[in-house]
Amino acid sequence: MTTELRRLRNYINGEFRDAADGRTIEVVNPATGDAYATSPLSGAADVDAAMEAAAAAFPAWRDSTPSERQRVLLKIADAFEERAEDLIAAESENTGKPIALTRSEEIPPMVDQIRFFAGAARLLEGRSAGEYMEGMTSIVRREPVGVCAQVAPWNYPMMMAVWKFAPALAAGNTVVLKPSDTTPASTVLIAEIIGSIAPKGVFNVVCGDRDTGRAMVEHKVPAMASITGSVRAGMQVAESAAKDVKRVHLELGGKAPVVVFEDADLAKAVEDISVAGFFNAGQDCTAATRVLVHESIHDEFVTALAKAAADTKTGMPDDEDVLYGPLNNANQLAQVSGFIERLPAHAKVEAGGARVGDKGFFYAPTVVSGLRQDDEIIQNEVFGPVITVQSFTDEAEALSHANGVDFALASSVWTKDHARAMRMSKNLDFGCVWINTHIPLVAEMPHGGFKKSGYGKDLSAYGFEDYTRIKHVMTSLDG
């Protein structure tokens, strides 16, 4: 007996539509490995229609007052709360994430972030007016950039959609958003929610694959392209956008160092690091997956972390005892497995290191020790539930190893020595440094990296400003 697949559709100019040429992709539930829906495989005609709708809606949305945009965003936040269980169900089917954790760890911050940007809509700051030339007064205007082409990833489909549309809409831009081809369901539901509140054309969703995303970035209409994804995808977006000098906002990969000194609270460090490393199956650019431990406590730390991994459970979304669900797709399972299969002879798998079950894309909580700085698994992003452990002899070596990768998104330092924590936070070349914690984020503080982790900020007033442009206006006092 064949189960009929649910049909997801694009959302363009206030209505749901199939792809113009009728092409679709099957969408798979990673917890089961079975297809549950079809999604449009959008082409140039669909991208054209979405961009035209966003461009047509832009003048009125741009000219709306900040308070009007704020009211729309606040209504969207309220609707997210009211539709929370629907969003959770869609996201869990999208990703296989635990239902209970999605309810407690994703819905509240998403709603809070939308409300934060609703407030930011009314705080378009510029330098105060003044006379910098005799007889002339200068003012600075902050304006929206225009239509924004946005591409969201599959690790946090709902939350990353919020990080993109909320600041863009608050600043007066219109949006064409593409979810990952493996996780479109919750984004299509978000379109339904926003569509019942915002004017038509202000928010549009186009589903598809990499070619769809490429067509969006290369399109002549958008003034800005924003992507959260791999380094390779970010480089391609930057190259494409350069052809017509689009503004680009990139949040790419990470390889967060977690530096544990000999005076750290070992029990707390192990507990927090294991959660921050394995949460969401390690599919997080800020995940605590590259641990550097002082040699004097290295063996004790590894033993404790291996036990924490053995005590960590992965499983189906409705199991309230699991910390994380499956990897997102078969390709990701193969990637994570490949890193473990290619480990050098000097590495030791202390826990895990294998697929769990034969249905879905589950992988065991894994700890690997005995690694060297130039090993593949140290230098490249695994994006799975794998924590590596290296030892260091002193602060200088810790800093050298921590900074010795191409990524620069997030990091953490574990010590009771305040001066050491301040030195490390100054010298760690990462966009975020946590001290005696790892992974908390708040709407008021910026999130973004350096080097191959990209540029631009999400969240905070800085993230809001990324979706604006600055104009100088000078007037003669002579009239």
Image: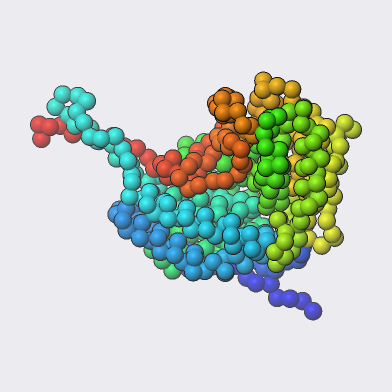
Nearer the observer, 383 or 312? 312
134 sits left or right of 441 in the view:
left
- The percent coordinates of residue 79 (x first, y second) are 46, 66
Question: What percent of the width, then of the height, locates residue 445?
Answer: 48, 42
Q: Position of residue 98 (x, y in %)?
A: 68, 61
Report the side of 249 relative to 380 (left or right): left
Tell me if residue 355 comes above or below residue 225 in the rendering.
Answer: below
Residue at point 63%, 59% (across, down): 101
Quarter of image, res 92: bottom right
Q: Residue at coordinates 55% horizontally, 52% vertically from top-left?
A: 160
Q: Position of residue 205 (x, y in %)?
A: 52, 59
**In this rendering, position of residue 1 left or right of residue 324:** right
Q: How is the image coloured?
A: rainbow
Q: Kindly tell me whether residue 131 is visible in this rendering.
A: yes
Q: Quadrant of residue 424?
A: top right
* 201, 302: nearer the viewer: 302
The residue drawn where x is 57% and y is 69% is 86
Is 306 in front, or is 204? 306
- Please identify the quadrant where the C terminus is shown: top left
Residue 27 visible in the picture: no
Total numbered circles: 0
Residue furthest to the left in view is: 478
Q: Residue furthest bottom?
A: 1
Quadrant that contains the N terminus: bottom right
Q: Residue at x 74, y 22 (%)?
A: 393
User: In the drawing, does residue 214 fall left or right of residue 472?
Assistant: right
